[in-house]
Amino acid sequence: FMLPQNFNPGSPEEWLARSKSNLVRARNIPDEPGFLLEDACFDAQQSVEKALKAIFVHLKVPFPFTHNLGTLLNLLSESISISEDIKQAARLTEYAVETRYPPSIEKVSQEEYQEALDIAERVFSWAMTIIS
């Protein structure tokens, strides 16, 4: 559903700061037993979600209250051009919910984590160029 009319979205810079924080957490995974890569992938997904919402705020376009990156990307593509490598971010949606709680479908591999991180880095950089 769409956010209410009186919702104050804050500034694009605030959304980017939150996106950056999630990206920093996704990058800096602890080297400790018990840490799950699923949690780092969740942070990568959150970084992308907040970066996209920063662009919505920058463009003054209303956005839905959703974690679905495909939905956000489709809506955003009505306002700006989005390259295929950015559209790949839709794949990170599964990390928003499915992998966060037991029973998780399957363990996240090192390769899947690295791919999620690379996508999040790309989307964050892209959002920075649009907003700055």
Image (cartoon, helix red, strand yellow):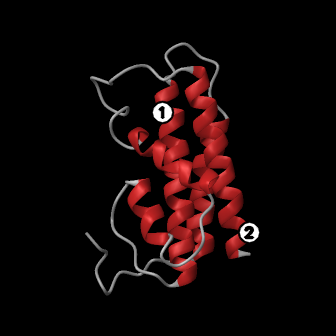
- Marks 2/1: CA–CA distance: 27 Å
The residue at the point 34 percent across, 60 percent down is 66
Most distant residue in the top direction: 33
Instruction: Judge the density around disc 1: few (<14), some (14-19), many (≥20) Cα neighbours within 10 Å.
Output: many
Where residue 21 sits in the image (x, y, percent)? 61, 51
Q: Give residue 128's quadrant in the image.
A: bottom right
Q: In this view, does 16 lie above or below 61?
A: above
The residue at the point 69 percent across, 62 percent down is 126
Tell me how many marks there are: 2
Of helix, strand and loop, which one carries label 1? helix
Q: Mark 2 points at which residue?
A: 129
Lateral position of residue 126 relative to residue 45, left or right: right
Question: Mark 1 belongs to which amino acid?
Answer: Asp
Lateral position of residue 29 relative to residue 74, left or right: right
Q: Name the residue under label 1.
A: 39
The residue at the point 33 percent across, 65 percent down is 65
Instruction: Judge the density around disc 2: few (<14), some (14-19), many (≥20) Cα neighbours within 10 Å.
Output: few
Q: Quadrant of the C terminus?
A: bottom right
Question: Mark 2 belongs to which amino acid?
Answer: Thr
Which of the pair 89/15 is nearer the observer? Answer: 89
Where residue 25 sits in the image (x, y, percent)? 61, 41
Of helix, strand and loop, which one carries label 2? helix
